[in-house]
Image: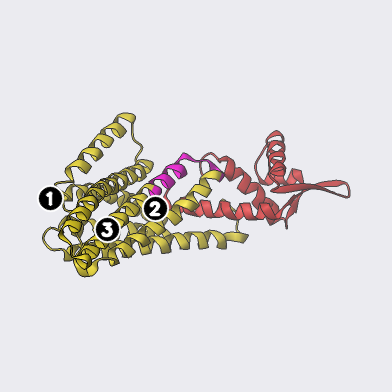
């Protein structure tokens, strides 16, 4: 049986809220970056927006799975009919497994795209990574931690890039950005070990919430800082 | 700033130069302040007029390039983009 629910029961719904916040932050930034792309036509902006949309979509997938499973399990308990429970769990399992597949695929695709903005990839590398991502998504069906290991690696590389950027310009916003991605990267560790205790899922979700909240504040701060420069010259 | 200026960099510099002069500037001054050739600047001004970011006006014997409200909003957006670019290392 494939494991689709990692959350302890008392945490049901709270994880949906955290994933909704994460998706909201990603979509908000992606919308702004799409507008920026329309102005300066730089491909990096386009890829950045697409990568954030992909990761946001992956969270929406996860929300859909969790919502369906939690709701149907609770609903089944209330109804209490064996035949009904069997039918409903069967259909929700199919939805959950396919949802989980898309969650992992979209998340890794988004992270790889974001990583590729900073580390230019040859066509051969893109092909190789696509194969590697699809393979690890399939393997994650049985060995769920494979997905978290790969996302930990990709997030780690992206975080390192943001940290190097901070070392170059020493700005508050770049430090916050590196910190937010560092927390999101570290949140993959408890997710990896969730088979030991479901409480690690709670820890992972809490870290994810902190990471995306810092990311939101970073973005707001970037916008505010940009607007404060009114009287200064554009390029300085 | 090092490196080749992008199109949005040039437009940003032009609009900033106009703002620095109180919202209006003579075309020759704009040319010097934005580091452009005459031909380049003419093409850019025509483009900016087409997009309603600036307008031309005659005062006495001189032509002036005047920034519009839309131009002010646009430079604001460009500053945001520049800041985003710096923060996210794009």
Q: Which of marks 3 and 1 is nearer the N terminus?
A: 1
Q: Are marks 1 and 2 in contact (CB under 8 Å)?
A: no
Question: Are marks 3 and 2 in one subunit?
Answer: yes
Residue A17 drawn above or below residue A154? below
Residue placed under numbered mark 1 in the picture: A1
Comes first in the chain, label 1 or label 2: 1
Q: Most extreme residue toward the bottom, as rendered?
A: A10
Q: Earlier in the sequence, mark 3 or mark 2?
A: 3
Instruction: Please indicate, yes or no, whether residue A124 appears anywhere in the rendered image.
Output: yes
**Would you name the residue on which mark 2 appears?**
A168
Q: Nearer the viewer, residue A63 or A231?
A: A63
Q: Colour of chain B?
A: red
Q: Do residues under tags 3 and 2 come within 8 Å of each other at their CB atoms?
A: no
Q: Give the range drawn in magenta.
A: A39-53
Helix, strand or loop at label 1? It is: loop
* Labels 3 and 1 touching (C-beta < 8 A): no
């Amino acid at each position: 049986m494939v494991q689709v629910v990692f959350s302890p029961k008392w945490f049901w719904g709270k994880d949906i809220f955290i994933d909704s916040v994460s998706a909201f932050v990603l979509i908000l930034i992606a919308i702004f970056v799409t507008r920026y792309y329309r102005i300066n036509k730089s491909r990096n902006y386009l890829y950045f927006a697409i990568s954030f949309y992909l990761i946001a979509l992956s969270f929406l997938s996860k929300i859909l799975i969790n919502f369906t499973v939690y709701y149907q399990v609770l609903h089944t308990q209330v109804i209490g009919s064996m035949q009904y429970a069997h039918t409903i769990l069967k259909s929700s399992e199919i939805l959950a497994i396919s949802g989980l597949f898309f969650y992992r695929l979209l998340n890794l695709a988004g992270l790889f795209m974001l990583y590729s903005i900073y580390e230019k990839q040859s066509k051969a590398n893109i092909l190789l990574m696509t194969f590697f991502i699809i393979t690890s998504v399939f393997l994650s069906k049985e060995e769920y931690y494979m997905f978290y290991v790969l996302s930990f690696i990709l997030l780690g590389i992206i975080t390192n890039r943001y940290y190097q950027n901070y070392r170059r310009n020493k700005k508050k916003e770049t430090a916050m950005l590196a910190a937010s991605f560092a927390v999101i990267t570290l949140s993959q560790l408890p997710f990896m070990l969730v088979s030991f205790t479901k409480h690690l899922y709670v820890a992972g979700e809490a870290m994810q919430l902190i990471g995306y909240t810092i990311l939101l504040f970073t973005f707001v701060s970037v916008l505010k800082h940009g607007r404060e420069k009114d009287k200064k010259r554009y390029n300085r | 700033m090092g490196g080749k200026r992008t199109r949005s960099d040039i437009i940003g510099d032009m609009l900033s130069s106009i703002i620095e002069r109180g919202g209006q500037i003579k075309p020759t001054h704009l040319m010097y302040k934005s580091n452009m050739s005459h031909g380049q600047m003419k093409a850019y001004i025509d483009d900016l007029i087409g997009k309603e970011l600036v307008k031309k006006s005659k005062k006495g014997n001189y032509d002036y390039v005047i920034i519009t409200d839309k131009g002010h909003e646009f430079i604001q957006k460009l500053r945001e983009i520049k800041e985003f670019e710096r923060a996210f290392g794009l």
